[in-house]
Amino acid sequence: MNVHIKSSDSNHAPVKVLVPQPDGQSAVLTFDNMPEMIGIPFIFMTPKANTINFPSGINIYKNQQLKKAFATNPDGVTFFSDLAKFQSNANLFEDKRLIKTILKRNTVYMEGETPNFLYFILSGKVKVLKTNECGKECVYDIYQEGDFLGYAALMEDCVYKESATAIENTEVAIIPRTVFLQLLHSNSRTTMQFIKLIAKKFSDVEDKMVKIAYNSARKRVADAILYMSKKYQNSPFFTFEREILSAIAGLAGESVSRILTDFREEGLIAIQKGQVKILNPKKLETLKN
């Protein structure tokens, strides 16, 4: 059968792929061997009333999500390869409970809870934050597809010291605590991988605290805008939520709004339909205190 895939880029013609098998599952399996197809979503439809083929279709979808996330973070390939060998199970996702959907604004975990899972983000974005006694949020980081989440508390054997909330609909693969800890104890490569992640996490937090302490409000908002752009794969557009920008910059919402207005009047950014568009990234990067 011929499959036509229309690119979202108007400068490119639709891709035409010849698939010898007539069914959709075979088509997706063919795409598995085509790197340029990674990240393209698929919709499975069937007129059949029975559910015999449903599990295999779901497993194909889950593996596609994993491959897309792996393309963002190659360390995920290493981890899941070691996990598959550890469990002697090539297909980790036969159990549909290992994939969880977190709706926008819902929590992945809360500060003070006992950790039970390691999370690997397949799609979407999650903010990690602490809240003070007045309810004000301080966002430490934003995690996206290809990132691991919740590993520090598991390795330290303590409760979560921060909360994690989805800022858009997010899918995560979940690995039970016992399985993760057993893999850590039996595989030095996995152990070193997560030690490096923890070291980077604390280095990033220290850098953020220094910037909040010494940078001007304008510089902090500029850095927050560039940070959000990076989290959206360096796109000049990203979804604008004043609360998140305020939390990242460590400023009150009113202050952030005033600075955004100044940046817009100076031709540095544009705000259109709930999105920020960066017009002059170089000037934002070199903005003086």
Image (cartoon, helix red, strand yellow):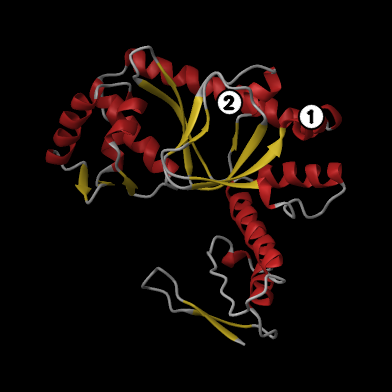
Mark 2 surroundings: few (<14), some (14-19) or many (≥20) residues within 10 A: few
Question: Whole-percent x and y of residue 17?
Answer: 59, 81
- Residue located 74% across and 28% down the image: 192
Q: Does any portion of residue 286 appear in the rendered image?
A: no
In the rendered structure, which amino acid carries the disc numbered 2? Lys
Which of labels 2 and 1 is toward the front?
1
Quadrant for residue 6, please give it.
bottom left
Instruction: Describe residue 182's horizontal placement relative to residue 12 as left or right.
Output: right
Q: Which residue lies furthest to the left in this view?
A: 265
Return the residue at label 2: 200
Q: Which quarter of the figure is the C terminus placed in?
A: top left
In the image, what residue occupies the spot 66% across and 81% down? 23
The structure residue drawn at horizontal position 58% and vertical position 66%, both measured from the top left corner, is 36
| Alpha carbon distance from label 2 to label 1 | 18 Å
185 relative position to 214: left or right:
right
Residue labelled with disc 1? 184
| Residue most extreme to the front | 49
Q: Position of residue 44 (x, y in %)?
A: 57, 71
Return the residue nearer the eye: 165 or 73. Answer: 165
Is 7 left or right of 20, judged from the image as shown?
Answer: left
Type of amino acid at the residue the image marks with label 1: Leu
| Residue 192 in the image: above or below residue 24 | above
Q: Position of residue 228 (x, y in %)?
A: 38, 39
Say few, some or many: other residues with alpha carbon within 10 Å of mark 1 (under 14 / 14 to 19 / 20 or more). Answer: some
